[in-house]
Amino acid sequence: MAAQNIFTTALIFIVYTLSTIVPAAIVLYPKVKNRSLSIRLGIYFLCGNTFAANVVFLLVYLHILYTPVVWISLVAVTVVLSFKTRKKPLKELPYIIVDFLLKALGNDLGGRYAGKQLIKSMGNGFKAAGRWIKKYVLKKPVELVAGLLICILLLYLYKAGIFTSYGYHASDIPVHNHWIDEMLMHQKPFTDGLYPFAFHTVIAYLFLLFRIPVMYLLTFFNYAVIIYSAFFITVLAAKIIKGRFMAYLVPAIWFGCRYLNDNSVYRYSAVLPQEFSTLFMVIALIYALDYLQKYRNQKTYARQDVISFAFALSMCLGSHLYPAIVLFLECVVIIIAYLPGILKPVCFFPLVKGALLGVVIAGWSIGVGALMGIPLQGSAQWAMNVSNQDSGSSSVGYVSKETDSDGTVTYQTANGDTYEEQPDGNVKQVPPKKKSLSQRIKSKADNVYQDMAGSIYYGITDPVKGKKAAEITVAAYVFFTLFSFVLAIKERNYGRVLLFISISGLMYVALLCAGSLGLKVLMDQGRAECFFSLWLALSAVVFTDSVITFASDFAGRRKKLVLNAASVAACAVFILTCFGKKMLRTPVTVTKLEANGAAVSISAIMKRQKPFTYTVVSANDELRMVEAYGYHVEVSDLLESIEKPDADTSFTIPTEKVYFFIEKRPLEFYGTVDGKRHKVSEKYAKKELPGSEGGLSIYMGENRYVEMSRLYYFVNELRHRFPQYTHVYYEDGEFMCVSLDQDMNDPVNLAFDYGYNE
């Protein structure tokens, strides 16, 4: 199975690249061929994803979302736009097609000539690819090695998702699977309400083009997101950093440093819209900063940057709300950092137009859905509840405790409330003492440091050191905010970028610690931690580079040599420190929400059985995996239906094949029993069924043991009663799949007494 997972992961990355970058490159190469490779790839990537997201929406609203229509749309748009960018009249297209067909069918020189011409064209294409590889890969050995090392680091960190855990790695992925299936099967764009949907339409686009099951896309597409995220954060760093090779440290620190928040990288073990949206947030910053360098003297490139910024904004906003909020705040900081020049009409208005274009592209689909009367999806209300929480309370709730000599215990909460517990047990709130301005500032700062230590630097187990790291972080952002003005004297643009990085860092501090600072809470702390961890990695490298750049200015004509030497030394120090002090993060552990045997079984069933000729009886995840291919019955529904069988009770599943998924050692589905994993047993089978009113709670903790134990003994009785119709389809130490073959004219009545029902 691991070999199949590796192949599937590589296949998804390749087809995603081919379906987004290649068509855009065919169209846009004449327009962007003189730009750097990274900028070109970013433009291709943005245009391809924007097309994928919006063409699926357009076709689903027209109720013609089918594979042939998507292929025709892709080919037609690519051909028409490539003619336009090459300034060829479109009316020549029929003549080109007719000429090719005549040659292929055997015109004057026969089909053999056409075949030779085709082979010659293919040979020229391979030669061009060889020249490209030689120019951009083989002639840059250091960059090649650095890129490979980052890929190895990512594979090391996320190997569990391929080698040890085969199923979904987030509990909400089945919901996304259901939304995508409803769009594909029933032409419904917003099944459960209005929601940023670009991520889902891109997944649907890949399915329609290459027929890779949605189940596989939602299991392994995260590796494509991880690789492109690492690539574009490196590109962003390279746009800022002057020292050679230091940009590669940013993804290495972000993903690999164990002292930063685990949640920021743990989330990438699953395919989630927020991480997909964050990718486009990073790309939007690349083109915003590039535009500010180009708008004066390179008008054509500046226009390309504005359009790219618009596309990145549209994909960011169209995929998830939180990265879009962060991107909006970043744009505000950019305006502050580049004052007053950015407010000049020649600079400001194109950016505004680009932002408005991005909002329109992202919002037209949701706008159409709103006009159709579709309400907001439930998570939108949850996000609003987060932002409406009490801003006066600390997000961590840090509490100090002091005991006086008389036994009185004094507690102080993070928001400044003080309580006293007397020796007799009585607790009363102490009226707040009026504090001086300096005391209030110190108290707020202390709360912020505690928040950061507990949420960002919890990898530093010593709380005193964690708090010290938080203090150094804030001090660094303040120092480099001031230092940027000094640097701007010699390096004006670099000084402004450094100011942008520093003020953004302080903005992330405020976003993370909004509760402690008494500010409006825009997002829950877990999401803010993810964005802050990314910015810390970028900030650390940029700050180091700014000091090296400033110092190298005093080297005169040897400036470049000193800059590169110091940069290489900084990289070496980081690598040695990383391994010397064991700073490398341990591989990401994932929560198994589906048994490996279940993933193996469902994969084999979907490949070998005809659609809608089988039913899977299992706990939960398989419901959304098979809904576009077969049928599903919940374990709880089966057991409840046969709980009290009598002579008149009947429960049948009218498909040729029925597959029962039994976890012999039930999964820890967000809950354990006594902190351990046990086997199914009579002890749990004798207990009362949990019922279906609790949602997923029926599959958590002891409830899952009851459900699986009952199912285990039910299947054993089924095999005993109908040995000629049942067989073990798959079995390992923790999981068993049993198949029931049925006569469609006389399906088996499953409502029998198996010893543990009433």
Image (spheres, rainbow, N blue to C red):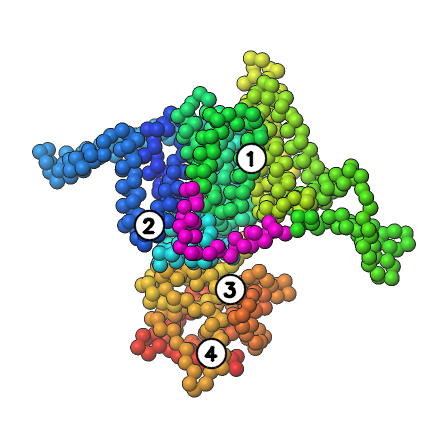
Q: Which residues are magenta?
A: 360-389
Q: Which mark is residue 332?
A: 1
Element type at marker 1?
Answer: helix
Please give left or right for residue 731 compared with residue 566 in the image. Answer: left
| Mark 4 or mark 3, earlier in chain | 4
- Return the residue nearer the eye: 549 or 515: 515
**Residue at image point 35% right, 37% down:** 24
Task: Find numbered disc 3 in the image and state the secondary structure of the residue it sits on.
Answer: loop
Q: Secondary structure at mark 4?
A: loop
Q: Is residue 451 visible?
A: no
Foreground residue among 231 and 357: 357
Choose top left, top right, bottom left or bottom right for residue 326: top right
Residue 70, x across and y down, in percent: 31, 48
In the rendered image, which residue does mark 2 sit on? 59
Mark 4 — residue? 642
Instruction: Look at 31% across and 74% down and name the residue there.
Output: 744
Q: Amino acid at mark 1?
A: Val
Q: CA distance from mark 2 to mark 4?
A: 44 Å
Q: Residue 664: x and y, percent?
A: 51, 67
Q: List the residue tagged with mark 3.
A: 734
At a point 61% along the width and 22% down the height, the residue shown is: 487
Q: CA distance from mark 2 to mark 3?
A: 44 Å
Is 5 drawn above or below residue 313 in the view shown? Answer: below
x%, y% of residue 436? 80, 39
Q: Is there a contact, CB below 8 Å, between mark 1 and mark 2? A: no
Mark 2 or 4, nearer chain start: 2
**Could you tell me what secondary structure mostly forms the magenta stretch?**
helix
